Amino acid sequence: MGGAVAFCLVYALYYGGGDTTDYYIGISAMMGLAGKNFDAFWEIMKGANTPELYSTFDTSIGYPEWHHWRDPNTFIVTRLSIPFGYLGLNRFLLITIALGTYSFLGVWRLFTMFVELYPNLKYQFAIAILYFPSCIFWGSGIMKDTYTLSAVCWLVYNVYSTFIKKEKVLINISIGLINIITIISVKPYIFISLIPCILFWILYQKVDKIKNKSIKLASGPFVIISAFSLGLIILNTLGSQLGVYGTIDGAIEKAIVTQQDLIRSDLYGENNFNIGKLDGTLPNLISKLPAAIIAGLYRPFLFEARNIVMIVSGLENTLLLYLTLVILIKGRIFKTFNIILSDPLILLCFLFPLIFAFSIGISTANFGALVRYKIPLIPFFVSGLYIVKSKLSKVNVEYNQ
């Protein structure tokens, strides 16, 4: 709730509006249309975005912003937010608080999962999942990021409860499907980054229970191939729902277009960066891999911050970089990697952030957008750092004894 209030104040008083206020305008217009022409309202809620339906709006109820209306992945936020519009009595602040509260449900589920598995790190997980400023702020407003942060966290919990704990299976499958639909509808590229990692986590969890070390080691390549093969089958099956991300060429083309769009200072300000030109070839993408991952995980650096919002993000990234360096220095690379590979959950905490960091780092050339886009990876990456740090401390204590 505090994050929602802060979000509203910053956008209203500091930015003077933005996407979140455009979403609110759309919500208000849709609520007005429901009272005036419910049939048209219901057709729009079912997914129709035609010029004829847009003409059913008028000045008495307002119009959704056209640039939102014509983009299905953007206008879905307006559709999803209609229930919160009624809960919030069509008031910007109250709608934001209601949506922020909903978002917290998914985040809280992830927190309870980590605490159940590593109860001695409860306070560290609270920092990583509940109290990280970027997640509180960007995950509490009427934005795409609020829905995707909650859905990603909740989906991982659903997978854990269904396939690992095997508890309340039907309920978790149902909620998990809702979260999958939400992610695909709002930001399909998050689903593309997440699904192979989840499949790998499930399969690796099974292999990890094998006591024979030789069989377990021999199963490694099978798990990797199986996870990514299943991932490709799922992605191919959902190709039409994923839009431009349904094919590799489409995803690359989208990354190039997005990168070139976000470096336009006339629209997005001067807070941009450039990891180099993309030409769509595989060698070119591979050459950008280190710079893209570093950007997705650690930028903007503190010295790159140009306003108060970027300064907060810069401080967070300094903490992440510090934790990463401490772990690498304290445990050295091989010991650190052995710990990561020893636990399927820890591996998920690093595999998903690395893949996702690359996907946003390669395409997002604006710091303002980057700090928002990266929030789904933060709870996992920071939690993973804390788990590895704890395990390294235990290893060092045992070695000294």
Image (cartoon, rainbow, N blue to C red):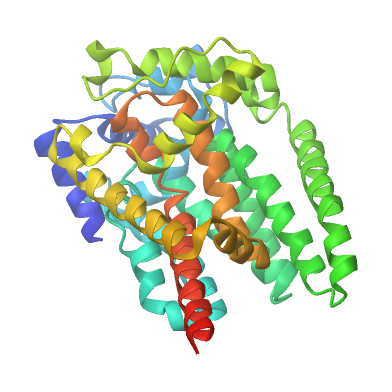
x, y (%) of residue 173? 70, 61
Q: How many marks?
A: 0
- Residue 345 lies in quadrant: bottom right
Quadrant housing residue 334: bottom right
Furthest residue toward front: 400
Position of residue 366 relative to residue 66, above or below, is below
Q: In the displayed image of the protein, which residue is found farthest to the bottom?
A: 401
Instruction: Give the side of residue 49 with respect to residue 180, left or right.
Output: left
| Residue 107 appearing in the image | no
- Is 172 situated above or below 224? below
x, y (%) of residue 297?
41, 43
Tell me which residue sits at (43%, 16%) in the image.
Answer: 276
Question: Please, is residue 328 above or below residue 7 in the view?
Answer: below
Query: Can see residue 321?
Result: yes
Towards the viewer: 220 or 382: 220
Q: Position of residue 365 (x, y in %)?
A: 37, 23
Residue sitting nearer the eye, 185 or 199: 199
Locate residue 205 relative to residue 122 in the image: left or right.
right
- Residue drawn at (57%, 34%), measured in percent from left and top? 189
Between 169 and 259, the residue placed more toward the observer is 259
Picture coordinates of residue 225, whole percent (x, y): 83, 45
Q: Is residue 8 left or right of residue 259?
A: left
Report whether 56 appears left or right of 367. right
Task: For the N terminus, give its image quadrant.
Answer: bottom left
Q: Residue at x 42, y 59 (%)?
A: 329
